[in-house]
Amino acid sequence: MVVSPARKISARFTSTYAGFEGESQLLEELYKRGLAQPHLTPDLRAGDGMLMAWHHEPIAPWQTEAWLAEMRRSLRPSAYLRQIENRFVTTESNFIETRLVGRVRSGRLRAARDRQRLTHRHAGYRCAETSKPDTSACCGPSCGRHAHRFGSSITPA
């Protein structure tokens, strides 16, 4: 989206929270450009045709201490920093271990469809998706008896 040269006042508006270092290049460039501008207030900077408000502290009236505590409990630490404190973060870890991806490709890892079988199997890895967005689990031997609570799973062949 570009600003219109035909209008006396033309603006581009972006509303977001921080992204991932090295992955959100456009956002990081805008952020760094904004940081280079003079302060108008502690969280507001302006200059070079840009006005940037970037907050690390809650500003909405509904962002209470109780809400913040719930967000700390329910989000991964890096997700809390990125989504609530508006800080760029690095990726925590791989979604699936490289060695498991290799086993899937070679056919040594297969999807398990029999939930009852999972409740009695206590060795190996089980990976599951839940209905909650951005949530999954890879379980080792210690959580084998609870694997039936998940919707779909992966177990060694």
Image: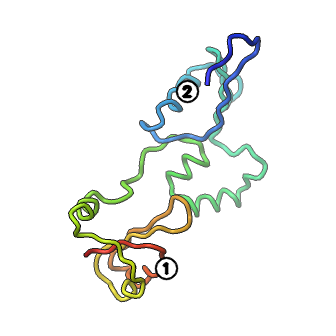
Determine which residue is flagged by label 2: 30
What label does residue 88 carry, if any? none
Q: How many angstroms separate mark 2 from mark 1 (CA)?
A: 43 Å
Rendered view: 34 above or below 107: above
Q: Quadrant of the C terminus?
A: bottom left
Position of 117 with respect to 83 (left or right) is left
Which of labels 2 and 1 is toward the front?
1
Which badge, 2 or 1, comes first in the chain's sequence? 2
Horizontal side of residue 83 vs 28, given as left or right: right
Which residue is identified by label 1? 149
Is 149 left or right of 139, judged from the image as shown? right
**What residue is rendered at 36% in x and 80% in y?**
142
User: Residue placed farthest to the right in the image?
Assistant: 61
Image quarter hosting the N terminus: top right
Q: Quadrant of residue 139?
A: bottom left
Give amino acid for label 1: Arg
Res. 112 image quadrant: bottom left
Q: Amino acid at mark 2?
A: Leu
Q: Position of residue 156 (x, y in %)?
A: 27, 74
Residue pictured at 42% horizontal, 36% vertical? 22
